[in-house]
Image: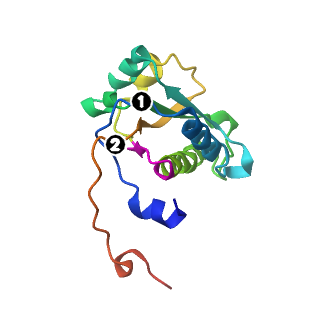
């Protein structure tokens, strides 16, 4: 699929078929994440591909919407503040780096004919504990990944004049 067509057609999907995601598609999505630019190329992240029913249930306990469990897998994006580039005030840029990589993931998934839905409204502390993560990791976002149960509807977008300004 053409890059701009991916941008025009990608939507947040909240209903999934149970069909497994083919390995070749997952490999291309993983490569897209690996290729994401990060500050000083430090790649301060790890992406967990959660597929087992038991592990998926743990993730779903931290997010109240039942549609998350429909997808054949859930991706959990983790940031590592200690290995990320620091801003001049000392704050870590790991959330920016993880977000760039996550966007690569959702766009690559769309190019592969798969659905995602970037989720940030979950209990971070609870998920951190359920996954048994060390204190060095920050749970930044998650997304279901799979084939959409129904085609998404088109969205309305603001006009350019509302979004851009020249000075």
For the residue pair 49 and 133, the one nearer the viewer reads as 49
Tag 2 residue? 148
- Is there a contact, CB below 8 Å, between mark 1 and mark 2? no
Task: Tell me the quarter of the picture where residue 120 sits.
Answer: top left
Tag 1 residue? 124
For the residue pair 35 and 86, the one nearer the viewer reads as 35
For the residue pair 127 and 48, the one nearer the viewer reads as 48
Q: Residue 61: horizontal and vertical position, in percent?
A: 32, 21
Task: Say whether residue 102 is left or right of residue 27.
Answer: left
Residue 138 appears in view: yes
Name the residue furthest bottom: 167
The magenta stretch is 110-118
Q: CA distance from mark 1 to mark 2?
A: 26 Å
The residue drawn where x is 48% and y is 19% is 131
Helix or strand or loop: what does disc 2 sit on? loop
Q: Report how many numbered discs are placed on residues in the image.
A: 2
Q: Residue 41: horizontal and vertical position, in percent?
A: 73, 48
């Amino acid at each position: 699929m053409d890059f701009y067509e991916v941008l025009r057609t990608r939507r947040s999907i909240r209903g999934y078929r149970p069909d497994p995601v083919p390995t070749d598609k997952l490999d291309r999505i993983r490569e897209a994440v690996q290729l994401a630019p990060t500050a000083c190329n430090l790649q301060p992240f790890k992406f967990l591909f959660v597929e087992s029913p038991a592990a998926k249930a743990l993730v779903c306990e931290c997010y109240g919407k039942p549609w998350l469990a429909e997808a054949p897998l859930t991706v959990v994006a983790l940031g590592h503040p200690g290995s990320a580039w620091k801003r001049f005030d000392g704050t870590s840029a790991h959330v920016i780096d993880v977000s760039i990589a996550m966007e690569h993931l959702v766009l690559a998934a769309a190019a592969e004919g798969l659905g995602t839905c970037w989720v940030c409204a979950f209990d971070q502390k609870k998920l951190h504990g359920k996954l048994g993560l060390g204190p060095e990791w920050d749970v930044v976002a998650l997304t279901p990944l799979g084939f959409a149960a129904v085609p998404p509807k088109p969205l309305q977008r603001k006009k350019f004049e509302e979004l851009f300004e020249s000075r």
